[in-house]
């Protein structure tokens, strides 16, 4: 569907090109969301065939990254975008990098299952922890991509704050795991698996947070990396003259 | 009235233009305001072409004026050295000062003013004389050099500063009109700087030149700003982005936005500026 914020250029072909890179990014995002959902499902259910599928999907994700990168490069060379158009292209270029990394983390989750032996299966309480954290990360990723599509800085900021809950989940899972591993050394192998998967989910939360920062940059024209919560709010509240 | 955030309202400071120090909007260093314009309106007969422009031009900066055709950018540029005086139906109100001097003071010698505020036009317009004579004419007229040796020095140094000396030193007495378009434009720049101006106004100086000649002029602008203040009107937004420290966007006779070039081209504050520079104007 055409983005109503990318319209009105003298050259409709140019608007179409800009819209297309956003659509392709969202397509890539949808693929990675599915990859993450499948990776979590495979890990929790011990589904080796689904895990294999997740690993193979990564090649498609990588192709998306290269294709969108080339499309952006072509727009930069041929159209020399300025102002919000330039920010859009820069934000897409940065976002595809993060989305691709999310795909890598999903692949890692699946790979941990493929590398483990049957005796290494974590306990159901541990898997519940991962499922809960995975659900939170999936929602955050979905909403981060939506805020990007809408170029909505306020929505992006709200999503960005969700990363704190994900970091808390990660800390909690690490603590639980440590207890399991100290109580029973046979659980070290499965405990490490849980730690790595939780770590991958925590990193996915960070990448979703980055996407939110690019959305704010796109909408407000200010690089908000490394800003405090208060400063972020000020940027988002700033109205154009 | 549109006054940029960077302007220093003289009437509030109680200072004269020559005394005002402002923070350079690009570098942050203290810089002297070279020219000030306050509430400048231009009328062609009954038609008001400029609706009260106020801005400052900082010493040794390159400032670009951009905007669609008919927005008033060239009209305003021509106000800065009273070129509009040559148009009978044109009337200018408001105040323009250069170094504490009202340039519309009726007692002012306009010829002298235009030596201080030189101008380079869209189309290279060398005199139908030799390269040497093109440069020597101004200094002779203004009595800046009378002896042949002094004139030779002025001609050589002006051509060197315009980056043309090596290309023409062996044919100084051949017609200036025999040079290529880019060389002719540099000859015109050399002719302008031969009378030691303080400000150079450029009205689309590269629009008739090919990309290589354009690059040479742009490089020259970068060098000239060490010694001169440069105000340039251009339709080429990439050129404005490349050469200028600050950019001003005009639309329908108003100054819509003025600010550091990198900010104006990445994050303009005004929607109309954004629409224009992204090609969504209208």
Image: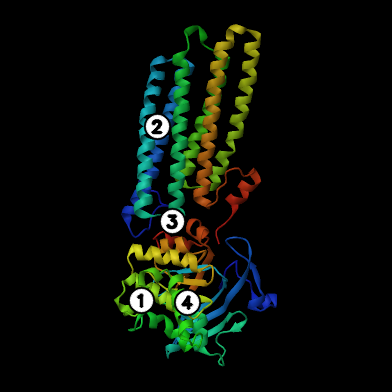
Above-or-below relation of B63 to A194: below
At horizontal 39% and vertical 60% (from top left) the residue drawn is B279
Disc nearest the viewer among 2 and 3: 3
Gap between marks 2 and 3, in whole Å? 30 Å
Instruction: Check disc 2 and report the residue beneath it.
Output: A31
Residue A82, label in figure: 3
Residue B124, label in figure: 1
How far across and how far down the image is residue A229, in percent?
64, 43
**Which corner quadrant holds the N terminus of chain B?**
bottom right
Task: Answer with the quarter of the image where residue A48 lies.
Answer: top left
Task: Answer with the quarter of the image where residue B56 lies.
Answer: bottom right
Gap between marks 1 and 3, in whole Å? 30 Å
Task: Label 2: state its secondary structure.
Answer: helix
Decide which of A50, B138 is in the foreground and name it. B138
For disc 1, the chain is: B
Question: Are the residues tagged 4 and 3 within 8 Å (C-beta)?
Answer: no
Task: Label 1: state its secondary structure.
Answer: loop
Residue furthest to the left in view is B178
At horizontal 32% and vertical 65% (from top left) the residue drawn is B210
At horizontal 58% and vertical 6% (from top left) the residue drawn is A186
Decide which of B190, A21 is in the foreground and name it. B190
């Amino acid at each position: 569907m055409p983005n109503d914020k990318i319209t009105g250029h003298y050259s409709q072909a140019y608007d179409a090109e800009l819209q297309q890179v956003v659509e392709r990014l969202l397509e890539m995002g949808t693929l990675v969301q599915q990859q993450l959902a499948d990776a979590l499902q495979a890990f929790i259910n011990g589904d080796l065939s689904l895990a294999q599928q997740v690993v193979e999907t990564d090649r498609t994700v990588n192709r998306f990254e290269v294709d969108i990168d080339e499309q952006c490069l072509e727009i930069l060379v041929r159209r020399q975008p300025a102002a919000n158009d330039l920010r859009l292209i820069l934000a897409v270029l940065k976002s595809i990098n993060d989305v691709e990394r999310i795909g890598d983390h999903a692949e890692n989750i699946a790979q941990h299952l493929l590398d483990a032996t049957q005796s290494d299966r974590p306990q159901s309480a541990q898997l519940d922890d991962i499922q809960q954290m995975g659900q939170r990360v999936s929602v955050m990723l979905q909403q981060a991509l939506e805020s990007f599509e809408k170029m909505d800085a306020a929505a992006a900021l709200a999503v960005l704050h969700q990363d704190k809950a994900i970091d808390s989940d990660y800390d909690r899972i690490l603590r639980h795991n440590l207890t399991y591993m100290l109580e029973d050394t046979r659980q070290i192998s499965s405990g490490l698996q849980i730690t790595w998967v939780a770590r991958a989910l925590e990193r996915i939360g960070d990448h979703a947070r980055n996407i939110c920062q690019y959305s704010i940059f796109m909408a407000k024209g200010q690089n908000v990396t490394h800003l405090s919560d208060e400063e972020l709010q000020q940027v988002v509240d700033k109205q154009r003259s | 009235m549109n006054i940029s955030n960077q302007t220093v309202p003289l009437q509030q400071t109680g200072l004269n233009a020559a005394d005002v120090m402002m923070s350079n909007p690009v570098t942050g260093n203290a810089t002297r305001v070279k020219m000030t314009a306050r509430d400048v309106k231009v009328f062609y007969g009954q038609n008001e072409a400029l609706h009260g422009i106020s801005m400052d031009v900082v010493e040794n900066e390159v400032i670009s004026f951009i905007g669609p055709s008919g927005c008033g950018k060239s009209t305003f540029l021509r106000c800065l050295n009273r070129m509009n005086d040559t148009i009978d139906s044109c009337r200018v109100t408001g105040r323009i000062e250069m170094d504490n001097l009202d340039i519309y003071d009726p007692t002012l010698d306009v010829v002298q003013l235009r030596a201080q505020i030189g101008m380079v036009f869209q189309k290279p317009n060398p005199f139908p004389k030799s390269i040497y004579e093109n440069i020597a004419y101004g200094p002779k007229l203004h009595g800046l050099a009378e002896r042949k040796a002094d004139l030779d020095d002025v001609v050589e140094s002006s051509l060197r500063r315009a980056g043309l000396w090596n290309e023409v030193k062996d044919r100084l007495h051949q017609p200036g009109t025999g040079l290529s378009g880019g060389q002719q434009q540099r000859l015109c720049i050399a002719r302008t700087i031969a009378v030691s101006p303080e400000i150079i106004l450029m009205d689309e100086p590269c629009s008739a030149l090919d990309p290589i000649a354009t690059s040479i002029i742009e490089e020259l602008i970068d060098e000239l700003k060490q010694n001169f203040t440069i105000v340039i009107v251009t339709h080429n937004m990439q050129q404005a982005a490349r050469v200028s420290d600050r950019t001003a966007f005009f639309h329908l006779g108003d100054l819509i936005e003025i600010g550091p070039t990198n900010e104006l081209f990445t994050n303009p504050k005004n929607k109309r500026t954004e629409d224009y520079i992204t090609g969504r104007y209208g």
